[in-house]
Image (cartoon, grey):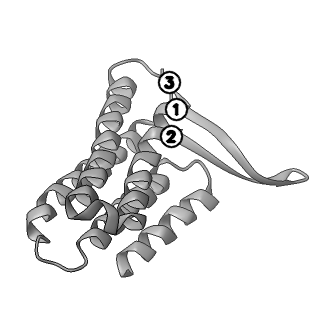
Amino acid sequence: MISTSILLAIVLAPLIGALLAGLLRKQIGRVGAHSVTILGVGIACGLSLWVFWQLVWGGAAIYNHNIYTWFQIGSIGAHVGFQIDRLSALMMVVVSFVSLMVHIYTVGYMAEDDGYQRFFSYTALFTFFMLMLVMSNNFLQLFFGWEGVGWCRIC
């Protein structure tokens, strides 16, 4: 069975890494910045693989639930939720795995760059937004993920 807490961990682990690397970049330094973001994306990748395994071979049901109501006006509301089927689970694995490989590769590639910590922060934030996009169960949340991905790409 796929739980909400696992799905939240998949999404929030890269976000926490991005925030730590971005906001505490002077305190944690270069090693700290790539360590927290690689850890966050690695957690997301491992849990995404587990969710994919459960859906494909473990007999888990498709997950489609709202976990938070942002606002409600009459019968119209904006919610935060996840819809996880085989396709979205596969995309979660692809997004988190590719992001993990990018994070690991750029430790050496960006070694001499002045924007090292900022780069890792934005790359992990990009991963968060992309996961929000592929896991969303509504258009507003999908749009939030889409715009976040675009914003991270130009920063």
3 or 1: mark nearer the eye: 1
State the CA–CA distance, disc 3 to disc 1.
16 Å
Position of the C terminus, as image quadrant, is bottom left
Check disc 1 and report the residue beneath it.
Answer: 5
Residue that lies at the very extreme toward the front in this rendered image: 27
- Tell me which label, 3 or 1, sits earlier in the chain: 1
Q: Which amino acid does label 2 sit on?
A: Leu
Q: Position of 63 compared to 13: left or right?
A: right
| Residue count near mark 2 (Cα–Cα under 10 Å), binned few <14, some 14–19, many ≥20 | some
Q: Which amino acid does label 3 sit on?
A: Ala
Which mark identifies residue 61?
3
Q: What element carries label 2?
A: helix
Can you give x and y, in whole percent of width and height, for residue 136 in the image? 54, 50
Q: Residue at x 45, y 76 (%)?
A: 151
Q: Position of 102 compared to 73: left or right?
A: left
Can you give x and y, in whole percent of width and height, for residue 15 in the image? 44, 54
Can you give x and y, in whole percent of width and height, for residue 81 in the image? 61, 44
Can you give x and y, in whole percent of width and height, for residue 94 in the image? 28, 49
Q: Is mark 3 on a helix, strand or loop?
A: loop
| Residue count near mark 3 (Cα–Cα under 10 Å), binned few <14, some 14–19, many ≥20 | some
Q: Are marks 1 and 2 in contact (CB under 8 Å)?
A: yes
Q: Is mark 1 on a helix, strand or loop?
A: helix
Check disc 2 and report the residue beneath it.
Answer: 8
Residue that lies at the very extreme toward the left in this rendered image: 108
The quadrant where residue 48 appears: top left
